[in-house]
Amino acid sequence: MKNIVVQKFGGTSVADTDKIKNVAKAVIKERNNGNDVVVVVSAMGHTTDYLVKMAKEISENPSSREMDMLLSTGEGVSIALLSMALQAQGCPAVSMNAIQVGIMTEKVHSKARIINIKTDKIRRHLDKGEVVVVAGFQGVTDDLEITTLGRGGSDTSAVALAGALNAIRCDIYTDVEGVYTTDPRVVPNASRLDEISYEEMLELARVGANVLHPRAVETAKQYKVPLRVRSTFKLDNLGTLILGVDEMELHRPVSGVASDLSQLRIVVCDVKDNPGTAAVLFNGLANENISVDMIIQSYARKALNTNDIAFTIDKGDLDKAMEILEKVKKDLEFSNVFVDDKIAKISIVGAGMIDRPGIAATMFKTLADLGINIKMISTSEIKISCIVAEDKAKEAVIGLHKVFHLDSEEIAEVKGDLPPEV
Ligand code: ADP
Ligand code: ASP
Ligand code: MG
């Protein structure tokens, strides 16, 4: 039996028919190495954005079921065209959507999790010598409802398939040459990392480095899938390898900086300072599948027996969240709700910050020196995030990138050497 390699190509890699022909060449190159190849593709170029735009022109609040029906069509176009391109170049190939494969998900529209992937049909085609081209981003429930995995979710389709097929590698081909210390389109002297741990990559993906979908990294870690991010347009470059933290040396306290403009902050004022208040509020949000990221509860005003609770959610969940707040108003007896949608979450991530004091202080001082006010803070073992005003995001990222010695000329000096002082 041959080894299986899963290759995933994102939207820019399949943006037009010439690019699709180019992707076919990359697939054939991998197949010529003697491996069985399963390819996962995204929708062409900005197709998914265009589909969202059309839906919004038809309805202000389209149902999530119909949104999934609509958005899943983009990937359907790419798989058929790539399969044709492979056949035209003499490579036997077959395209399959999520129903045909059996990419089974939970019954949640727009951000479903994969529960299980059936592999028998794929294996039958691989055994016939065919390349199997699978639609990313989509799934199906056990009662044949179409779901999608969340924006950017094709990465997760690829890694989950690699796990299910016991692939020797999952290569995520994209429009940059790997994982960088920050978005190279925002900071041109960002440095490409040769390797990064699953843990750091997971935090970076969660805090806005959209080069990988967070659940793809989670799945890779869980199933120990060797994962690489590399360039579609420079096939010989190996890009960035994502691997276990115990397998790498920690040269640096901070590995990356990211910004996320997709959230907004809601402040609920003067809620009763009683047991159960937070439970009522956040249960209500959870029941509507709204993920809450940061939460801050202010120091109770004893005389009034009230508190303020501030939290952040995705901008797209605002309408649903406001409906929930309306429903719980009589229980929580709050006075006011403020919405601040001009915020950015700026984060630094690094496994090397564990047991190294002073990293948070350096971050706060850097922002202070730039005159940037911090509205909320949250930390985990290997991450510190601050909410700042949206129009300060770029300045904050550039400042932090510099202070933590991540600019390309500095990284080149540090590799293989002692960690830099911060
Ligand atoms: P694809 O369509 O291939 O899935 P994406 O647009 O989802 O591509 O992801 C690639 C983009 O991620 C890059 O073009 C880059 O602008 C952005 N990005 C954000 N943070 C990083 C980072 N730390 N390293 C590399 N790319 C990043
Ligand atoms: N086409 C989907 C999106 O644009 C999925 C993906 O590209 O990963 O979000
Ligand atoms: Mg992507």
Image (cartoon, rainbow, N blue to C red):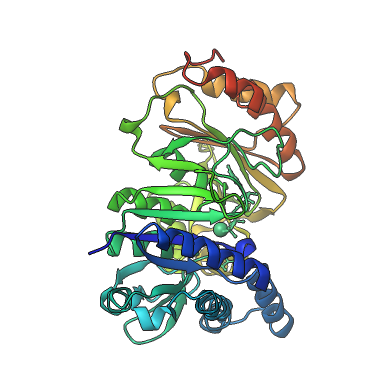
* Rendering quarter of residue 250: top left
Q: Is residue 235 above or below residue 5?
A: above
Question: At x 40% / y 32%, what residue is drawn?
Answer: 381
Question: At x 37% / y 40%, what residue is drawn?
Answer: 243
x and y, in percent, of residue 162 in the image: 34, 60
- In front: 289, or 261? 261
- In front: 380, or 420? 420
Q: Is residue 80 above or below residue 206?
A: below
Asked whether, in this view, residue 20 is left or right of residue 40, the answer is right
Question: At x 60% / y 69%, what residue is drawn?
Answer: 20
Q: Quadrant of the C terminus?
A: top right
In the image, farthest residue toward the left: 1
- In front: 222, or 353? 222
Q: Quadrant of the N terminus?
A: bottom left
- In front: 31, or 184? 31
x and y, in percent, of residue 165 in the image: 28, 64
x and y, in percent, of residue 398 in the image: 70, 31
Q: Is residue 39 above or below residue 63?
A: above
